[in-house]
Image: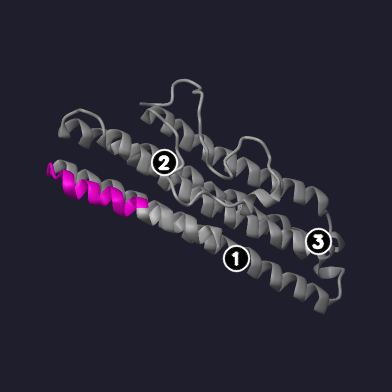
Amino acid sequence: MKKLVCLGLCLILSGCTSAPVAKNDAVRKVNVNVIEVSASTIDEIEEMASKDVEDTKAKLESERDALSEEIKDFDAYTKNIDKVKAYYDDALKQTELLSIRLREYAYKYAELIMNEDVSYKVKYKDLSGIYEYIYEDAGKDMYGIYDKTVKNMYDIYYDGIIKDAYDTEDYDVWSDASSDPYDDWSNCLSDIYDVWSDMQSDIYEFQSDLRSEVYDHNDERAQKKMDKFKKSILRMKEDVND
């Protein structure tokens, strides 16, 4: 079930696009009432999840690089500090939305398999794809938002422009510009890690619990696991709209 061809995909998920989008798209309302993945095969879902992560990372990296091109020195930084903070807010929001979508991919993946007219043995085996393609491939790739995309902001600003200004700027001005940006960066990075970690934990637990029920041939309990996971996704979508 590897991604062998470029599929024609139909994905109606807010914030998922291969082209740069405006900042206000990050706070666009999402549909909280349904699981918004339109796919007929698990191959499609594998492709969707991978592309979604790549597109989100590319968008955030593009915005980060555009900001660094605009802010070249300490003076430009102090005049545009709000833009840097806005980037952190957007990065966190995009990560939250992506984490919800990855849960949706995992749910839809399971739904397609559970609806197949195949043996429990086949379902048990196929459900391992949630771990392999959503948790491992897409989930660990999403870690790059934390480990590279946003983490790199430290090198650009705190350990770059701000550090270089130590010998040229008034100490009080420099100190304020040094401590606050570090806190903004550190808090954003910590929040993004928590979002990623919670998402990974939820997807792992979901696929593990569901496979256990399939292994035991317990359709009723398997459906309860499905329903519980779906409800948790819908609650998250409501929260992210607030």
Q: Nearer the viewer, residue 59 or 104?
A: 104
Q: Regarding mark 2 in the picture, which secondary structure is present there?
A: helix
Q: Position of residue 136 (x, y in %)?
A: 39, 42
Q: Position of residue 173 (x, y in %)?
A: 82, 75
CA distance for labels 1 and 3? 19 Å
CA distance for labels 3 and 2? 38 Å
Q: Nearer the viewer, residue 237 or 216?
A: 237
Q: Count how many numbered circles sit on residues in the image.
A: 3
Quarter of the image holding residue 154? bottom right
CA distance for labels 1 and 2? 30 Å
- Outermost front residue: 33
For the N terminus, the image quarter is: top left
In the image, what residue type sits under mark 2? Tyr
Query: Magenta stretch: residue 224 in it?
Result: yes
Residue occupying the point 26% across, 48% down: 208
Highlighted magenta segment, given as a residue range: 216-230
Pointer 2 residue: 105
Question: Mark 2 packing: few (<14 Cα in 10 Å), some, or many (20+)?
Answer: many
